[in-house]
Structure formats: C-alpha cells, structure tokens
Image: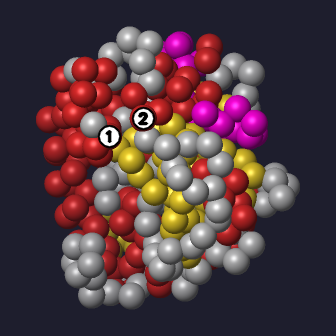
Amino acid sequence: MKTLIGMVTYGNAKYTKLALDSIKEYDKFIVIGKFGDNDTVELVKNYPHIYHTKNKGFPASLNDIFDYFLSSDYDNLVLMGNDVIAYPSAIQQLETLSSEYDWVSARQISVKDLIWINPSLKSSFGENYSYKFDGSSPWEFFHPDNNSAEPEAAQLTDCQNLNLYTRKAILSVGYNDVNFWPNGYFGDNDYVYRAMLAGVKSCTSKHSFYFHFWSRTIYEAERKRANNVYFERNKKYYISKWGGLPGQEKFNKPFGDGMFSIGEKTFYKWDYDFNREMEGYFLSYWSNK
C-alpha cells in the first residue's frame, strides 16, 4: 500500500517544518500558495512541489494535489495541514482502515485542548495561541494510549487537517469548488456534503490523533478582518449552491439543478466538480471582487 501526503502552505514555514518532521517516512507533495515565500521554497526543495506565483486560493491548491495523486500510482492520499503535527502511528492507522473505508479521519488535539488539559503548557504560547518556538514541545504532553486501528461510528469529518482519501473517494466526489476563494471557508462543508450525497463510506479512526496549532495562516500570515469578509461571502455562496447552511441543505444537486450565474456567465448544468476547465474564470472573478 502506497500513501502520498499532500500539503498546502501559505507562509509559516516554521510550522510547516514541524509538520514535515512528523511524517518523515512518507512521500510528500507540497503546494506553496504564497508568492515570495522563499523560506518554504527552501524548506521543500527536495520534495515534489508546485510554487504558485499568485494566490490561487486553498481549494485550487488542493485540486493541484488531487491531480498529482490521480496521475500517480499511490493508493491513498492523506491531506495534512501545515500547522498540524501527526502523532506516532496516526497515519498507519488511517492506512489500515482504508482497506474497508474510503474516507478515514483522524482526531484533533488543538492547542486549546492541550492547555485545557494542562494549563501550565500555556507558557509555550503567546497571543492568539501562537507558538513561541522556544525549544519546548508541549504537544508531547499528550500521549495517544492505543495504537490499534479501530473505527468509530462512520462519519464524514475533517477534510484537510489529517484525512485519508482512497482513489475511489476522490473519483466519486470530484474536485474542490474553487468558488470558495481564497481560504476555503465552507469549502470543507461543501466537500463533506457532496461526499455524503455520493455515498462515500467513511469512519473516524478512534486512536489516530494529530496536534493542531489552530489557524496559524489566519492569525499570523493573513489579516483576520479580510478573512471575516471571505467567511461571509463564502457562506452566501454555499447557501445559494445548496439551499441552506451546513446541516440545513435543501438541494441534493448543486443550485437545485437549475441555472446559476457567476459574473457574466450563466451555467445550466453543474459539472465543474469533475473538471477544471472553468477554474481560471472563477478565480479571476473572485480575485477581482
């Protein structure tokens, strides 16, 4: 069984290094999403990677990973955030469960969870839980107590932080919708809902954990105010696409299987999920809004 780790970065090379150090034994493909991020370019120079010269956004970057994976001979793709650390055996457990499930999620221990468990660990973090890079390894306080691959009740969760897809899952659900530009707010909800409609068999690996530094791109590389604007815009788009907020969807086909318009173009049938032909138009439209 061959597994590829796919990762999108947008600055924060120090966090990316910690993430990569936790998965040294796996093949990796990196998408560098921030133009001028020379630190990450240097960090991943020995790995297969793509360097974007403009901000194509998170969903399009994930699609680049999908294309690389689908053109390869890997059996599984694990999407991993660049601000997470995989605990020992976490990915092995995902792989084991992929023999029965096509979407396997790990479980999160966030910096907030860690500090709640042991308040003294807060000394390693600063404003907005930013890690101080002081030589400490506070995430090591948490020790997963079981290395067995045991599924919990089937559920579609966690698209990107540490989540395994089989080839069948990606071919069933398709590409990520780049209209959730640029940071992918609600794009994960979109992908989960589409996977549910496609009948993808899924589970959460009960003993597979990752540590999450918690939204470092938002708080350290991007302006939070701008992200609030993107959040509201993407929410509006999600509602138009599915007829309601996550958990309140009314449509079982995008836009109720009717017409919809983006910019000057009107679409009569939604087939973008399985091709990237209109991606450039969508990205140009949203980036100029």
Disc number placed over residue 265 in the picture, else none: none
View extreme (front): residue: 145
Q: Three-letter amino acid code at disc 1?
A: Leu
Whichever of labels 2 and 1 marks the residue nearer the N terminus, that label is 1
Q: Are marks 2 and 1 in contact (CB under 8 Å)?
A: yes
Q: Quadrant for the N terminus, please.
A: bottom right
The kind of secondary structure element at disc 2 is: helix
Report whether residue 18 is seen.
Answer: yes
Which residue is drawn at the image coordinates 41% and 52% (left, top)? 108
Categorize mark 1 by other alpha carbons within 10 Å: few (<14), some (14-19), many (20+): many
Q: Three-letter amino acid code at disc 2?
A: Phe
Residue 85 appears at what percent x and percent y? Answer: 51, 37
In the foreground, 143 or 133: 143
Which residue is drawn at the image coordinates 16% and 44% (left, top)? 228
The residue identified by callout 2 is: 141
Image: magenta residue range: 22-41
The residue identified by callout 1 is: 114
> Is residue 239 placed above or below 11 in the rendered structure?
below
